[in-house]
Image: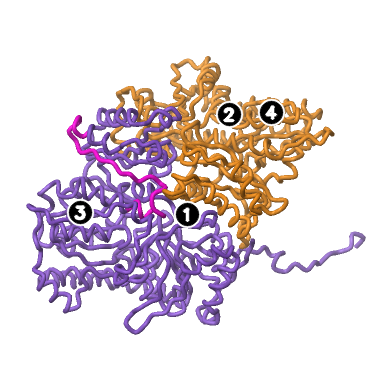
Chain colours: A purple, B orange
Amino acid sequence: MSSTCEERTELECEYVDPGEVKQELISRYPTKVARKRAKQIVVNEVGECGEVPEIGANTRTIPGIITQRGCTYAGCKGVILGPTRDIVNITHGPIGCGFYSWLTRRNQTKPEDARDENFMTYCFSTDMQDEDIVFGGEKKLKAAIQEAYDIFKPKAISIFATCPVGLIGDDIHAVAREMKEKLGINIFGFSCEGYRGVSQSAGHHIANNGIFTHVVGGKDEGKEGKFKINLLGEYNIGGDAFEIDRVLEDCGITLVSTFSGNSTYDQFASAHMADLNTVMCHRSINYVADMMENKYGIPWIKVNFIGAEATAKSLRKIAAYFEDEELTARVEEVIARELPAVEKVRDEVRSRCEGKLAMLFVGGSRAHSYQELFREIGMKTIAAGYEFAHRDDYEGRNVLPSIKVDADSRSIEDLEIHPDPQRYRLRKPTEALEELRSKGLPLKEYEGMMAEMAEKTLVVDDISQYETEKLIEIYKPNIFCAGIKEKYVVQKQGVPMKQLHNYDYGGPYAGFKGAINFYEEIDRMVNSKVWSYLKAPWQKCPELSARYACD
Amino acid sequence: MLLRHTPSEIKERKALNVNPAKTCQPIGAMYAALGIHGCLPHSHGSQGCCAYHRSTLTRHYKEPVLAGTSSFTEGASVFGGQANLVQAIDNMFTVYNPEVIAVHTTCLSETIGDDIPQIARKAEADGKIPKGRFVIHASTPSYVGSHVTGFSSMTKSMVDYFARFSGKRTDTINIIPGYVEPSDMEEIKRLAAEMGVKNIMFPDTSNVMNSPQTGRFEMYPRGGVTVEALARTGDSSGTLALGKLASSAAARALDIKCKVPCEILDLPIGLNNTDLFIDALRKMAGVSVPESVNVDRGRLLDIITDMHQYFYGKKVGLVGDPDHLVALTEFLVSIDMWPVHIVTGTPGKAFEKRIREITREVPHEVNVGAPGDMFLFHQWVKNEPVDLLMGNTYLKYIARDEDIPLVRFGFPILDRVGHSYFPTVGYRGGMRLLEKILDALLDRKDRDDPEEGFELVM
């Protein structure tokens, strides 16, 4: 397969019939596959009350289709626990899983001083050999924990099960309990074998359940302040969390914990001391917000710090929740102080980017949140989809009751949460919350990606390599956003590709300064002359001007 | 400090690997499979394996790396992955139209004991394999060996599945290049062509993993050994296998299967190893060495003699794969550098013995870790500092903490370009390696020399 690419404009794209595109995408597949993919490829329509069509999501990937998705272990160890610096994370398995998840996600961390614990630069593995597979690996795991303790003396150790561990039946939780007893530090395990669930999403869930069960609530003192919040689902890629921290601090908002960018064990342990949970990546963590509400009485709101307008809006939401005039005034002050610089760059970049087309196929929230940044510089998202999100991330939380729990989801434990007898404290009476809601503060709400996307745009869940290539060929977007595996496939088609997992080693893109960085980066990418050199002079004008040898 | 918890005191560890100097088999199998023209590698296991391998190879090469996965779920893990693999084969041939699907296993499918040839036969019986298309496989459990073992197994599979003896010997020489870069494969082929030796190289990732930017995406780029050429390897008059660990299994299999005699050499890194390669190729093919090769050799030697003062007595710490380390250590010792800490994560007893032989004359205690990890290596460096580090990108954390110059070499290199375009094998590759070593050492000297001793000419 091959394709060439020239730019298209928004106008030209209006003539492309998305229904036909969908047919073209699935026509190549065997019948059964086409039927399944048809459910996961949807032409967007938004009804008057924001209702959108149903999309197939969080279902099994079809073998051989060439997917973007990774596994449960990657979601658990790589995404959620990876960014915590002071837990020794031991991968129990053959070497690969530990190796590949070693420092590859760009979740930055900044210990307060030179002596603070930081194990993020280390990869710990039991490096299972064939004899461990045959005779069981529990003994080796115990020894590894002991060695880790002897050398590093960490405050906590966690264990991650890889595929063969589940199959041979090593009981990592029993080992964890035994060693916790023996060593007197917190030790806990995650049954995050790669084959559980259908994507990384299952791993997020297993990780968050584990942190919630084993760590949260363990420490009753935390950061003090008048307005205490947790930030859930922020992983500090490229320093995003640092920028969000800066803005929150300027507003006088105290961040008790972040799940899990730039985080520490103690922050998790004292998370229940916050008075509001703010959720960034809805997909990876919304259930933690629910559990914290049920167990500790902390309400939650959805926020988004990707995009300058979105950041301002999120700060205002937080201020609205605390109902404090001083805070509201300070938030407005910060917004007023930050926005002029953002607007200056935005307007300039917009003049060069207006009307250009973007496609975003990434993650479980970024494909939505980054549309905001593109919108701010006048670019249009013509197609988008998530790698591992669920229906509620596409269609909004109101579809939650109608989502069928299938066998794959059932294997992920859904914790039953009761109010903590000592620590449950209703932050605001139900009536007060209702009043806030009626004043327009959306509590526990997320409308999903599709309601915010234009009509006739395409929404594709778990996009395949073939569909990626085809969409680029048909729409010829000015930029495509996905991950490392897609990076050069797209760029070889002559289209700039922005990685939204690792930011192409740039960032931060969150908050106000992040928005400026992103505008400038997209401007660089979509307007660069480097893409104009694809053809050599002799390829542009192939006619010969030969001379006879006897001349 | 980035590695602030690494103490200089060394405690014995029996169970915990810290900062590995290897990765698992399947990624090597995937890389080798990409060296077959029109091949789509397939990972028979959970999705994560495939995603991790593709990501790591992509980061190293900055090229598209496409591969399928059987996307195991709990059900497949319990009942076996046959249905998943058959469906994957059907989808891949239907949608992506490869000439070959090269399946490698994972720790998951190996533990449950999936029989890949049986599943492939089932796919064939079900009509899922189009005529003239192939499914090959290699068994690559992650709990045995390392990425190098996986590369070796997939390379051997190319022989097992395709090589045949037609009854007529040709004057072609097979070259198995080992786990090296596409640039290295290109350079080895260039040398052979320069000498007028007809050859079949397998695997051959040149023009696959270093393909040009043209604005056209080719799922199956121009490069790679063809199935037809692989079949002809059985008729060749000899096989040169470079790198014992990565290449000897395939070379021996070809000898047994098609009676093609083989010679197994170290990777042609540096002057002496390239001499051995050229000499072996000359004799095997019955050709004489052209002047152009002598010129290359002379140029490499010229750099060595001209700049010897800067190499002499410099202590080096090396982390990498056995085949690379054996050849590289020999090269460094040959120019009077002193490799003093040498670590590979790949298990194997012969390695340490070889390294001890090569470093016999180094007037210093030599630490060899096989298998070892980068944590142990770092501790050795703390106890006995070196002038230069050579190894993959993960060494940059040690290099920064200990303030030691680093030359990137081996796999993976995630933070620099060049390795896929410029070789480190052959005489020209040797020149490039020396240039890199000198740049690192002399930049450091320029940084550290006192003002009065700052040299204009070096």
- Amino acid carrying label 2: it is Leu
Residue A81 in sight in this render: yes
**Residue wearing tag 4:** B277
Q: Do discs 4 and 1 share a chain?
A: no
- Numbered label attached to residue B245: 2
**Which residue is depicted at the point 81% across and 67% down?**
A545
User: Badge 4: few (under 14), some or many (20 or more) residues near its Cα, within 10 Å?
Assistant: many
- Amino acid carrying label 3: it is Ser
Quarter assignment of residue A33: bottom right
**Residue wearing tag 1:** A484
Disc 4 and disc 1: Cα gap in Å?
37 Å
Q: Residue furthest right?
A: A550
User: Badge 2: few (under 14), some or many (20 or more) residues near its Cα, within 10 Å?
Assistant: many
User: Which numbered disc flags the more N-terminal residue, 3 or 1?
Assistant: 3
Which residues are drawn in magenta? A180-204
Q: Position of residue A541 (x, y in %)?
A: 72, 69
Q: Chain of mark 2?
A: B
Q: Chain of mark 3?
A: A
Image vertical order of residue A203 relative to residue A358, above or below: above
**Residue wearing tag 3:** A257
Instruction: State the residue in front, A402 or A250.
Output: A402
